[in-house]
Image (cartoon, rainbow, N blue to C red):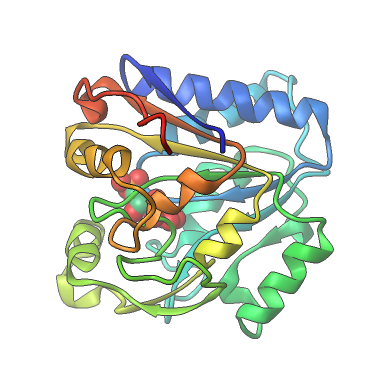
Amino acid sequence: MSTEKVVVSNYQEMAARAAEIVLQRMQEKPKLVLGLATGSTPLGLYERLVESYKMGKTDFSQVTTFNLDEYCGLAKNHPQSYRYFMDKYLFSGVNIDYRRVHFPSEVEDGDEYEQKIMEAGGIDLQILGIGRNGHIGFNEPGSDFKSRTRVVDLTEMTIKDNARFFTQPAEVPRQAVTMGLATIMDAKEILLLVSGSGKAAVMERLMMKKPSVDVPASVLHSHTKTTIIVDKKADGGQRDLPSSL
Ligand code: F6R
């Protein structure tokens, strides 16, 4: 396995390092297939990708994207939908071809999403954030490592964490459709971004644990090419990956 942990000083540096990697991969392969995450963590990365495009350094016209997840029951143009988020923070700022933009909520079922990923040649680079409970995508603790794209119930912690984006907690959807852990693991390369003291506890659990369904992100320890870019606040000065992993 080759999971590399890169500790950077702060959020901005994390975003800059992530952008460097994504832009380099796009240069190597203009038809790159990108797996994308929403949430606050990748915002700085997306900002830098838009910046690079606006400076004429990057071309998204042949890039294909697959988003990790989406709430169930929110319209595409709902301000809290992940589709809306991606339009706002990335797609509207670059020359992406919307025919190559994919969301798991915009297909018949999980199998069709998996099929589309396969037809695109698989995901070259998957961007991930991590939840305080160790989730990636909406794969909550207890999710099967063999899971594929499917509809899931959200945990109370995730509903609570996401409530800040809605006017009332009752408005937070209770279900989402997400790529599964096995879908994520099929990506050729993975970039997990972790920032802020709120993630320090889960980061410590992630680094200490052998793969366990209690911390879904720990499945990444078995991936062949994963880079974890973590800032000092989230790393909490923790040790490196145990060499046995
Ligand atoms: C979002 C997603 C989630 C987030 C995670 C962290 O598409 O898949 O797993 O990455 O909840 O969210 P933030 O970055 O807001 O802390």
Residue 10 on image: x %, y %: 31, 19
Residue 8 on image: x %, y %: 37, 17
- Residue at left offset 60%, top offset 63%: 183
Left of 43 or right of it: where is 95? right
Left of 71 or right of it: where is 182? right
Kindly give the residue lying farthest to the front in the view shown: 244
Kindly give the residue lying farthest to the bottom in the view shown: 108
Quarter residue 28 falls in: top right
Depth check, front residue: 176 or 200: 200
Residue 86 on image: x %, y %: 53, 51
**How many numbered dots are placed on residues in this image?**
0
| Quadrant assignment for the N terminus | top right
In this rendering, does residue 53 appear at all?
A: no
| Quadrant assignment for the C terminus | top left
Depth check, front residue: 49 or 68: 68
- Residue at left offset 20%, top offset 35%: 200
- Residue at left offset 21%, top offset 25%: 233
Residue 35 on image: x %, y %: 61, 50
Depth check, front residue: 245 or 71: 245
In the displayed structure, 213 sits above or below 71; it is above
Kindly give the residue lying farthest to the top in the view shown: 9
Depth check, front residue: 206 or 130: 206
In this rendering, does residue 68 appear at all?
A: yes
- Residue at left offset 23%, top offset 50%: 132
